[in-house]
């Protein structure tokens, strides 16, 4: 999500009492998939306020603003959507009251993946009202961690620190960043599940995996043009060593953000299927099950064209990857 994107647009303002958003009929096939999918695997999308999901999630023609304000409760009733990514918090921290409001819209089994404010992960901030707080533990605790944990409580999932490309071209630069990040992560309070997503290939080195392991922090296996595929990331960061498997399927290869939006809107169908990425995420989920770990996969509309449809296909792939072979 980028600044100016209307999705989750009312996330931080005062909102009136929720107005129910009518949900689309739930197909029996989805209920069957839910019953077959191991409960430790959580699939979801990044945001929920897309009118183009009419007939998939919504009945009728709710507006983007109405969905941003009230659509989460309907989203959370979908059999396969047991988590959601809160991307807007990357651009502006949310107050505790907003997390409380969101928590009230979901069931006890639902979990949120929340992105930390960009001031913590950039050498500069695009928010003119916020100074750069790069790797500032005090700011992370006061403005990110405390509101999330106190507002969401047991509904809090991973807190994700996304580091946009920093131009780490050399081993020296990468090692310096890894040491600084390790010091920051080790100083954070114990309890929440933290995850880190890099957008510089240079950090994929043994010291990166060791730093995350020592800090008890998860690597986010992402599909993004700036990074190698998840299977390559897994060669450096062994999924078996992770506190949980955290995955994000963001942007289709070869497409820029705006080009993907133009190509895929209104996000109601698979346009560019990516079976290779789907298979890699299914294998990561299978490894999570084999090692008794929770797994999270957040999918963006710009991965294949429709995040909800991608969730359905991934659920089938995970089930296939974890089902015992038929006897011959």
Image (spheres, rainbow, N blue to C red):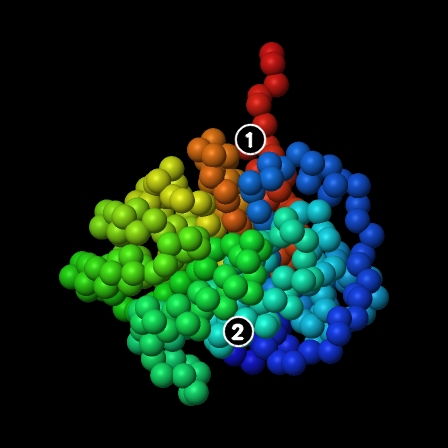
- Residue 123, image quadrant: bottom left
Q: How many labels sit on residues?
A: 2
| Between 243 and 128, the one nearer to me in the picture | 243
Q: Which residue is mark 1?
A: 322
Residue 158 at x, y percent in the picture: 47, 55
Q: Is 228 above or below relative to 129?
A: above
Residue 284 at x, y percent in the picture: 47, 40
Residue at image position (30%, 51%) is 215
Q: Is 217 above or below relative to 35?
A: below
Q: Is 5 above or below relative to 174?
A: below
Residue 261 at x, y percent in the picture: 59, 69
For residue 9, say whether it is visible: no
Point out the tag, 2 or 1, that comes first from the N-terminus. Answer: 2
Q: Is residue 241 left or right of residue 44?
A: left
Q: Which residue is mark 2?
A: 94
| C-alpha span from label 2 to label 1 | 38 Å
Q: Is residue 168 left or right of residue 274?
A: left
Q: Is residue 216 left or right of residue 311?
A: left
| Between 294 and 190, the one nearer to me in the picture | 190
For residue 21, say whether it is visible: yes
Farthest residue toward the bottom? 128
What secondary structure is marked by label 2? loop
Residue at image position (81%, 56%) is 24
Farthest residue toward the left? 172
Residue 94 at x, y percent in the picture: 53, 73
Q: Is residue 71 left or right of residue 311?
A: right
Residue at image position (63%, 37%) is 37
- Residue 176, image quadrant: bottom left
* Quarter of the figure with the C terminus: top right
Which label sits on residue 235? none
**Neighbour tally class for label 2: few under 14, some 14-19, many 20 plus, Cα within 10 Å:** many
């Amino acid at each position: 999500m980028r600044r100016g994107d209307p999705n989750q647009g009312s996330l931080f303002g005062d909102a009136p009492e929720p107005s129910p958003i009518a949900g689309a009929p739930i197909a029996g096939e989805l209920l069957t998939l839910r019953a077959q999918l191991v409960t430790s695997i959580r699939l979801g999308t990044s945001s929920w306020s897309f009118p183009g999901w009419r007939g998939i999630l919504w009945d009728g023609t709710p507006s983007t603003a109405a969905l941003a304000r009230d659509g989460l409760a309907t989203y959370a009733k979908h059999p396969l959507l047991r988590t959601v990514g809160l991307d807007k918090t990357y651009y502006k921290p949310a107050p505790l009251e907003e997390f409380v409001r969101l928590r009230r819209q979901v069931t006890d089994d639902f979990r949120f993946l929340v992105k930390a404010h960009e001031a913590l992960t950039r050498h500069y901030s695009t928010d003119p009202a916020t100074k750069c707080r790069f790797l500032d533990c005090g700011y992370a605790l006061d403005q990110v961690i405390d509101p999330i944990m106190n507002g969401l409580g047991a509904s809090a999932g991973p807190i994700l620190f996304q580091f946009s490309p920093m131009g780490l071209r050399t081993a020296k630069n990468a090692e310096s960043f890894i040491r600084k990040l390790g010091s920051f992560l080790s100083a954070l309070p114990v309890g929440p599940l933290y995850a880190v997503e890099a957008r510089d290939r240079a950090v994929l080195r043994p010291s990166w995996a060791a730093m995350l392991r020592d800090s008890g922090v998860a690597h986010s296996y992402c599909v993004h043009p700036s990074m190698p595929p998840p299977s390559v990331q897994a060669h450096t960061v062994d999924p078996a060593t992770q506190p949980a498997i955290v995955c994000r399927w963001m942007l289709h290869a070869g497409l820029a953000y705006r080009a993907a939006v133009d190509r895929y809107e209104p996000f109601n169908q698979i346009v560019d299927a990516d079976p290779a990425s789907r298979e890699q995420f299914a294998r990561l989920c299978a490894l999570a099950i084999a090692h008794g770990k929770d797994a999270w996969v957040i999918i963006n509309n710009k991965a294949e064209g429709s995040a909800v449809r991608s969730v359905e296909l991934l659920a089938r792939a995970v089930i296939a990857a974890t089902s015992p072979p038929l006897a011959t």
